[in-house]
Amino acid sequence: MTYQSDFTLPSEILEHIAEQGFDFLPELIRIVINAAMQAERQQYLQVAPYQHSPDRRGHANGYKPKTIKSRMGEIKLDIPQVREGGFYPGALEKGQRSERALTLTLAEMYVQGVSTRKVTAIVEQLCGYSVSSSVVSQAAKLLDETLEDWRKGPLGEFPYVFLDARYEKVRQSGQVREAAILFAVGVDLEGKRQILGVSVSLSEHEVHWRAFLQSLVARGLNSVQLIISDAHEGLKAARIAVFGGVPWQRCQFHLQQNAGAHVTRQDMRREVAEDLRTVFNAPDRYTAEAYLKKIVQKYVQVAPALADWLEKNIPEGLTVFSFPASQRRRLRTSNGLERLSREIKRRTRVVSIFPNEAACLRLISAVLMELNEEWQVDDRIYLTIETNGSLPSP
């Protein structure tokens, strides 16, 4: 079986991906090398599975586990066996010698998200033999199943939940649109972080946020004592609908940024920012509210719109004062999610425009799943929970 294709992967894309690295893709490498080795065994035997043919060269005899070491750590593979012996997959050797090339293949495979024909051509160039579209589709299916299992895994008690969104360009019906990537991070009773879920939607409208939050509850998310997020209207409405009785901490960092839009003069920006930091760094809520009252009075004459905005909005950023002082620094903003956003951007900027929502969700899920695994094996505590396990009552 021979496959001919004039498809050539743009060298500048390869170079760009090579520079950025795809260190989060060991699972993808495992799936594709396993699929390539299976295809090579089938080609060696000259028969399809369960097919009877006089041309058969031997019989499949299961798989033998093998762990290879790579710059991404250990990768566990399943080496196809032939009962009569004499077979060893060349794809494994080439995979070990050309790990970077395979990584780029995987990047292209799952970034493209549409054409298995293109993936077939790339794998043929790398491995030296043809791999059918059905094998490629099966590899993609296995990966998607792995990622979906992670996205739908059971949750539990997470007293603190952070919510945020970012945007990626996605093609839909011939048009390029901004898709909202919704994600949630929780802090468990041991003070460790966990990525709770991710979703791709074509907007941050309430209906999408509500469906996302309801999916977290359906997976068992409970005992939420505080939600930390920005004040996007769609998120706000969905949060009230799904977690109406749970206190909300509006991100203080975003509050400071929002305040800048109500400053009438450029030379006031620094002063306003310092005044807000005084409020947010107060020792307790009573003092913070006293400081807030003073700065509202300070600007009521020179910037009445600002004073009115401060009075109405800043109290939403003071909920954190109801929680232990040792936890406030972590809970008062959603800045802890910035690393997630940076990691997503670092991988997705080489794509520029995703071919569809499924491709976007696939790549971002792989990034977040890898980060989540790093968090789980990290011994460091993100947030110190009181030793008696007590938390404020909602």
Image: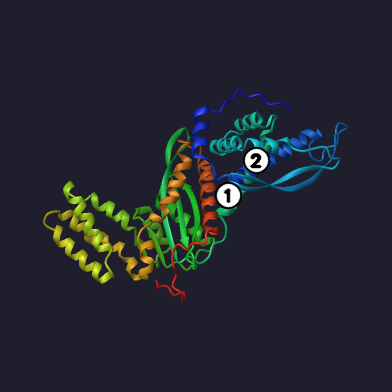
Q: Residue at x 60, y 30 (%)?
A: 118
Using the rendered view, name the quadrant where residue 320 is placed. bottom left
| Crowd band around label 2 with a 10 angstrom C-alpha radius: few (<14), some (14–19), many (20+) | many
Q: Earlier in the sequence, mark 2 or mark 1?
A: 2
Q: Is residue 308 left or right of residue 2?
A: left
Residue named by callout 2: 32
**Residue 186 pos. (x, y %):** 47, 61
Q: Position of residue 383 (x, y in %)?
A: 44, 64
Rounded to the nearest whole Å, what is the CA distance between mark 2 and mark 1? 15 Å
- Residue located 39% across and 66% down the image: 327
**Residue at the disc numbered 1:** 147
**Left-right relation of 20 to 287:** right
The C terminus - image quarter: bottom left
Asked whether 109 or 12 is in front, the reply is 12
Q: Is residue 109 above or below residue 2?
A: below
Which residue is the extreme one toward the bottom?
A: 388
Q: Which amino acid type corresponds to the residue marked 2 in the rendered image?
A: Val
Inspect the image, locate mark 1, and give the three-letter code of the amino acid beneath it.
Leu
Q: Nearer the viewer, mark 2 or mark 1?
A: 2
Q: Quadrant of residue 159?
A: bottom left
Which of 362/35 is in front? 35
Residue 181 sits above or below residue 57 on the image: below
As helix, strand or loop, the secondary structure at mark 1 comes to helix
Residue positioned 45% across, 62% down in the render = 382
| Left or right: 141 in relation to 196 | right
Left or right: residue 258 compared with residue 354: left
